[in-house]
Image (cartoon, coloured by chain):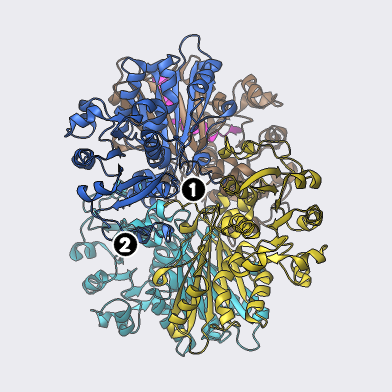
Chain colours: A cyan, B brown, C blue, D yellow
Amino acid sequence: MIRAAVVGATGYAGAELVRILAGHPEAVITALTSRQYADVAFDSIYPAMAGIITQKCETFDADSVCRRADVVFTALPHKLPMEIIPEIIEKGCRVVDLSADFRFRDPALYAAAYQSHESKQLLAESVYGLCEIFADDIAGARLVGNPGCYPTSVLLPLVPLVEAGLIDSGTIIADSKSGVSGAGRNPSVTSLYSEVSQSFKAYKVASHRHEPEMEEKLTLAGQKPVNITFVPHLVPMIRGMETTIYASLASGINEPDIRQCLEQYYQDRRFVRITKQGRPPDTRDVRGTNYCDIGFVVDDQNRRLILMSAIDNLVKGAAGQAVQNMNLMWGLSETTGLTAAPYPV
Amino acid sequence: MIRAAVVGATGYAGAELVRILAGHPEAVITALTSRQYADVAFDSIYPAMAGIITQKCETFDADSVCRRADVVFTALPHKLPMEIIPEIIEKGCRVVDLSADFRFRDPALYAAAYQSHESKQLLAESVYGLCEIFADDIAGARLVGNPGCYPTSVLLPLVPLVEAGLIDSGTIIADSKSGVSGAGRNPSVTSLYSEVSQSFKAYKVASHRHEPEMEEKLTLAGQKPVNITFVPHLVPMIRGMETTIYASLASGINEPDIRQCLEQYYQDRRFVRITKQGRPPDTRDVRGTNYCDIGFVVDDQNRRLILMSAIDNLVKGAAGQAVQNMNLMWGLSETTGLTAAPYPV
Amino acid sequence: MIRAAVVGATGYAGAELVRILAGHPEAVITALTSRQYADVAFDSIYPAMAGIITQKCETFDADSVCRRADVVFTALPHKLPMEIIPEIIEKGCRVVDLSADFRFRDPALYAAAYQSHESKQLLAESVYGLCEIFADDIAGARLVGNPGCYPTSVLLPLVPLVEAGLIDSGTIIADSKSGVSGAGRNPSVTSLYSEVSQSFKAYKVASHRHEPEMEEKLTLAGQKPVNITFVPHLVPMIRGMETTIYASLASGINEPDIRQCLEQYYQDRRFVRITKQGRPPDTRDVRGTNYCDIGFVVDDQNRRLILMSAIDNLVKGAAGQAVQNMNLMWGLSETTGLTAAPYPV
Amino acid sequence: MIRAAVVGATGYAGAELVRILAGHPEAVITALTSRQYADVAFDSIYPAMAGIITQKCETFDADSVCRRADVVFTALPHKLPMEIIPEIIEKGCRVVDLSADFRFRDPALYAAAYQSHESKQLLAESVYGLCEIFADDIAGARLVGNPGCYPTSVLLPLVPLVEAGLIDSGTIIADSKSGVSGAGRNPSVTSLYSEVSQSFKAYKVASHRHEPEMEEKLTLAGQKPVNITFVPHLVPMIRGMETTIYASLASGINEPDIRQCLEQYYQDRRFVRITKQGRPPDTRDVRGTNYCDIGFVVDDQNRRLILMSAIDNLVKGAAGQAVQNMNLMWGLSETTGLTAAPYPV
């Protein structure tokens, strides 16, 4: 059994990690840490877990946690992970970090979007944990930077097409829509039920910090600089993320080329499902699961491709992909512990 | 492996059965029937199940279904089950019926609430599938009448107390609140998003057909006629049912007596959780699970007990309890296939 | 024109006051105060009001506010109003207070539920602003204590029946359900969209501070001590409050007596609507309006009356009733400025 | 007083017309028709209207309706209006049609998207009722084709910029999101609460019938053929529509040019509000109102304009704009009867 610690276990991503690990046949939770809820039983904070996860949260202590863990999941606000991960690695644990701290190749990009990077050596070693794209690198990694939810929803449909040159990478627009859990469990007026329900709006228009993360990976895939326009929106639902992507088709490329490329790229990857006959993916169909559903339509008149993806922002966009990374790191089937069927409604 | 058929697989209860059976380690789905969607792949109707349940729905045919099944779950509107179940039983399958047709002991009560009963012999043989109360009878049953969602939420907290005489059974009031999925998947104006969202109201006040089902079982528990006042309400949420029950305490009975009675009655039953210190149970904490959470508060001034229960109407109130019944019928642990942890949000 | 000041204008009740007063033909808003948003334009906080209410919020200053106002609405947390209202009254303004500070007759009841009362003289003078019951007293009042939302939903259906002795006042149970806006605009985990959506639960079971407020008024109506059991619940919707009340019928009393009593009591009061044929009132039908819809059903078998009421907690339960009180204080028709039709959906 | 008839009064657009006309100071409702609910009181169908609109619905009869009406609003599915409007016009009433039947200039475009047009002469005469753009033509019209909800949300932000040549009209992409009420009141599985809640998806991708309506009007504005890519999405909320539009800036055009163009174009039009400093418009801020809020951001790196609009699909997208058209046709201020302030939450 893999001994797993969750650092920052009481935020939504952390709690989702706990849920998934609780049902993982090859892992056991050995430590849960929380600054805010130290010494409080996990099921007092999440009573849904009564009788399932009854252990207490503890204050993070590297010695204590690393002694009991093989893998440490860090589900903390950015900046904190790069302060504690070096010690965790040094003590011999492998790490999946859910923050932005170890997602970038280029420290300057990280610095521009967040702050100066304080652990550049580890950054150079870390692997970007987009499992379907970087599975081979992940297998050997000590430290994985788990992708952001928006980048996951944008990169999975785009990377194969950009790599293959089937679209004009200078024309990419990504219009994303996220459920409210993406804003986390910290209380703020803008996440209140009465403010969010019956409301739809864009936010951080062309200025979200996930955009450079996407652009770095698309640049890598296209082997030339790729800039995109990215606009996130807030949807009145708890979980789920839909992204509709627009791009001009490369010359001579048509609907069957797109289908073939995507189906071939993902033919052995169970968590990516290409929908039939252009059926738009629905966030409901992936709720609670690690799937990324991808659909597409070609707008012939305008020679434009319309790509759509749907994920659960807390699962494939965070905790589920983190566990998928663990599976890859330990040589398990990537689906281990992630096969629970979604709710019909 | 138990070979399981779901008759009426595309309604919400049926689809929830499919979800649960898909993850059951001791069962395999061998037939899915649907009048409306005969010959359509299940995952075309529920695209969430793409790649998980791809088999086609078929028209119900007793011969064909029974040849392939050990257990048949009937998830049909009442009246249809009592027409087809006799033949299914005769062909050697065991049946869990999710309708009202085999829930009553007294055919006259069924007749008053529904219509004349056409299979009284089987009715006499059938067992009421409230697992925590009638586990012993269920074990040997050929035919189980799976309880209604409202009766489940009312009986689990009440039966131990009525049996023990801790409350005055002439004073029971049950104020229930249900999510919208209880109304099923048939399109009707009253279940439209625009009608239900941002709305709360009572319906079928003191005239719901689940009330005689409760009263028959409470009468049995109390060994004297019990009539209750039952008022269901509709909550703008998909799943979940909360019931708040009011009853006068019997003379000399106080908070510790109630707690002791409930905790003792359910000490070995994993799916009933008594909340700590009167914490009101939340439907969110049982969503997607087979739990029934029970809390209570004593209103000393008025010598009244306030009991609260929370279940998922589609799981413990329908498909989950049906699978729990199958587990008991086959001598498995009652929790088999029903242990997935609930979502934190 | 009545010059109106709103003290505490940026909470939900305050903002709802602003909305209603903005369309009132006999009132004009002359001051909006806010501690948190002093010097910020109201439509920066509520962009819905862009181009409608553009004036700035200001820090409360009694001199400055009273010079410009005839009526002051105080929409503040309890305790603050009793500190500032004496001065406002002294400066010649009339006051409608939306907090609990001036709702009680008996200072000891207030002290038991809140804290020691610091303005007992004004409390003795103040009038309880339940408009349909105390209209005559309100007309001459300098200071009105606007009722709580729960008490409004409980008292309007009950007071006529308790006054007339048609029910046994020792058997009253009120099971209330409120939308989330009742928790206000202060950020807290328990009001987050992700926590509240798809969730239903009771809270403050038999211990809510609105209960003594109800009991004092019911005792007054019944001319003997009345204790009730009161359980509030939280509904995943923004606005609206439904209360289902249970009570034993007095000897010899039947459905027509109840109907006659209620219809007669409210025959001239436009904001109370008795529904036809026991149709359960729906919060949707009163959303955004000052109506209180009342329905009822007699449970003959148990000789119990089931009363149901629906209000908008922010309108009839707060700001709308406050404006109705102003109308009565100034001798206007009570419906002035409160006649906008509700949304069909 | 303008005597107004609503033909098709019980659908959501029709009922919203009733709500708005009920509060219109210069109009009186003289007839409500409904095939489905003939002879049923309007407030039996919409109990929210109890005591407000109590008249009965009637079967449509041109003679009877036209004798009592000056203006007839037709809120019917397309095809029906073009069958009955010729007679209504002939009998001397003026008409605002909320269907697609009289929105197109070119009958061939209508035929391609809907069916052959059976009233081409009236079509030639009819005026497109996008009030802020075609106010002068509307003033004298006998027949106004009220714009679709999506076209309203797309055209109001785009027309000024396309007319002025500030964007490259060959690059326009409109990503729209609509609340569920847009699907109407006819029961269908896809509009059920349990299907729509907690779900987000695209539909009719690049194939919605509102697209040719937009393109015809943009072609007119740009004086050259304009094709766009249009993708609608379904949001789990009752009302509201947000559209995010992407287009390349024309050479030399920057943020201040865009702001100046929009602010100047709409400087005298109260129902279009340009948000401050690029604040993304929120559907919540226009709920229940006739406003169209417009915001924009320039993505300098990609030389792209991001335009966002928010309307209430049932008001500015249907019934409110229909009443605004009536106001213009009768020479009233366009805001008459449309000034109720929006709810803060």
Q: Residue at x 68, y 81 (%)?
A: D225
In percent of width and height, residue A154 lies at: 48, 74
Q: CA distance from mark 2 to mark 1?
A: 24 Å
Write the start and end of the magenta stretch as one range. B143-165
Q: Nearer the viewer, residue B191 or D120?
A: D120
Q: Quadrant of residue A47?
A: top left
Q: Amino acid at mark 2?
A: Ala
Q: Amino acid at mark 1?
A: Gly
* Mark 2–mark 1 CB contact (< 8 Å): no
Against A53, residue A313 (above or below) is below
| Residue A257 appears in view | no
Image position of C341 (left or right of B119): left
In terms of secondary structure, what is the magenta stretch mainly? helix
- Looking at the rendering, in which quadrant would you find the N terminus of chain A? bottom left
Q: Nearer the viewer, residue B30 or C66?
A: C66
In percent of width and height, residue C125 lies at: 24, 28
Q: Residue at x 18, y 33 (%)?
A: C119
Q: Chain of mark 2?
A: A
- Asked if the stretch drawn in magenta spans residue B32, the answer is no
SS class, disc 1: loop
Q: Nearer the viewer, residue C58 or C80?
A: C58
| Residue C82 appears in view | yes
In percent of width and height, residue C98 lies at: 31, 39
Check disc 2: other Cα within 10 Å, few if <14, some if 14-19, many if 20+.
many
Which residue is disc 2 drawn over? Answer: A4
Which residue is disc 1 drawn over? Answer: B337
